[in-house]
Image (cartoon, helix red, strand yellow):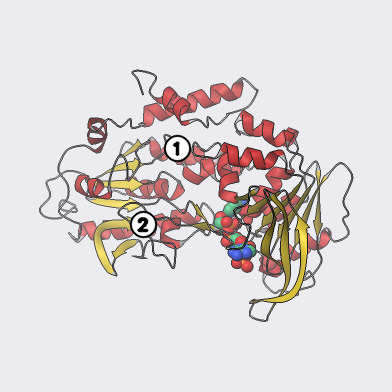
Amino acid sequence: MTDAAGPARPSRPLRVAVVGAGPAGVYAAEALADQDDVPVAVDLVDRLPTPFGLVRHGIAPDHHKMRALADTLRRTLDHDRVRFVGNAELGSDLTVADLRAHTDAVVYTHGASGDRRLGIDGEDLPGSIAATDLVAWYTGHPDADRGLVESALARARDVVVVGVGNVALDVARVLARSPGELADTDMPQHVLDVLAAAPVERITVLGRRGPAQATFTTQELRELGHLEAAVALVDTAGLDDQSAVRAVARNLATLREWADHAPEPGRVSVLLRFFARPVRLEGTDHVTGVVVERTAVDAADRLTGTREIDTVPADLVVRSIGYQGRSLPGLPVDDRTGVVANEAGRVLRDGVLSPGEYVAGWIKRGPTGVVGTNKHDARETVAALLEDAAAGRLGPGGPEDDLVDTLLARGAHPVLLDHWRAIDDAETTLGATRGRARTTIHDRTALLGHAHPTPAR
Ligand code: NAP
């Protein structure tokens, strides 16, 4: 195809910037690089010095098989049509206008990194945090708020996790695991030390609707029943629901196996309690409890309150009630939906298609699905992009100067593939010092020190 990028363009590859090197971004880069119709040059841009997004900073560190997905994703970084450009942040190092000027098309895949709020009194008390805070911390995200999380964990005897999705189960499981069970993970050493010292005795996971409405998956639920130093308990309300949906029936069957479990001395209790909606967090200078209202669910799975109130003791409250897409400077999300308005991946601005702008992943469809869901999602977006390129519908295209040259001229310090490989080597070397495959380096300065050992960073 000779004029795939539009008739006015010289015969050079179609230049595409993908913003966000998480699974959706890598899958979009892969879909672009692996097709033979149009020569492409893809810049895979990320604000972090490291690639892989939620595979590195979301998937729980004890889920080794799922984290090994990084080994598959890294093959795309090695592709000669793809260039990783890390440590380049939209809004400070680059603008949307820069990207538009340097490329023929931009695919935004920056995910949904914000946390949702409960909107109840006491939510901002010390000791009340978002799952996103905890997950960022235990996966060694450079922006994690160590003080917030570590001070909360230091006194966390009674933990309440609000929400019954897979993130809530990740959080409960990581907090309930013994130090020995976490020893072979890639968590930073300070994370392992703080978790080992945390006084956790009881974890209550609260679902505002019934067990039949929970969004966790059976495999993740079953894991809670097989922890070395914890016992899984369940409040039996709703377990006799005769659901015809297979996934729900499997969840209920797993929960029923726990119905006669009782707390065991010396083991962490992990209690799943349903039909309980938080109405207020108690405490003066620190959270001490979650006031919950018992709920009921009608035939259409809708929630109603019963006005029956009780208080669950809590020194740490983790709200795990979903993620929220955030606007990038120059790319607003729809306040109502939390995603960038789009049609099958084509960005809409003020309801009108914006030529050359696309979205994939959570910022396109919302924070749902497993990592693999992003593959199909990214392919749909790339198909739209290539169709637009073939039809000459992209914008006028950019000048010939290079994105990385522009970043360097601005005094930025982009992390390219070889720099990332140096970080990768440093993490495996650090891991080996303690008999592990890898230890995540969490400090941005240290990461950049490995990426750019000389001259000054
Ligand atoms: P999620 O599955 O949407 O779960 C959110 C939970 O929060 C639901 O139980 C929801 O209850 C509850 N909730 C929402 N607002 C609430 C409120 N105001 N008060 C009380 N509860 C509230 O989201 P997630 O757990 O953050 O997971 C995000 C995505 O990542 C999911 O697709 C998940 O499967 C995926 N993920 C997968 C894995 C894995 O495969 N191992 C691990 C982690 C994440 P309602 O249903 O009543 O709204």
The answer to whether residue 231 is seen in the rendering is yes
Give amino acid for label 1: Arg
Q: Position of residue 282 (x, y in %)?
A: 70, 57
The answer to whether residue 139 is seen in the rendering is no
Cα gap from disc 2 to disc 1, whole angstroms: 21 Å
SS type, badge 2? strand
- What residue appears at the point 67 percent right and 71 percent down from the top-left corner? 245
Residue topped by disc 2: 359
Residue topped by disc 1: 74
Disc 2: CA contacts within 10 A as few (<14), some (14-19) or many (>=20): many
Using the image, determine if residue 88 lies above or below residue 23: above
Q: Position of residue 415 (x, y in %)?
A: 36, 31
Label 1 beta carbon within 8 A of ligand 1: no
SS type, badge 1? helix
- Looking at marks 2 and 1 on the same chain, the residue that comes earlier in the sequence is marked by 1
Q: Is residue 260 left or right of residue 394?
A: right
Disc 1: CA contacts within 10 A as few (<14), some (14-19) or many (>=20): few
- What residue appears at the point 44 percent right and 68 percent down from the top-left corner? 336
Camera-nearest label, 2 or 1? 2
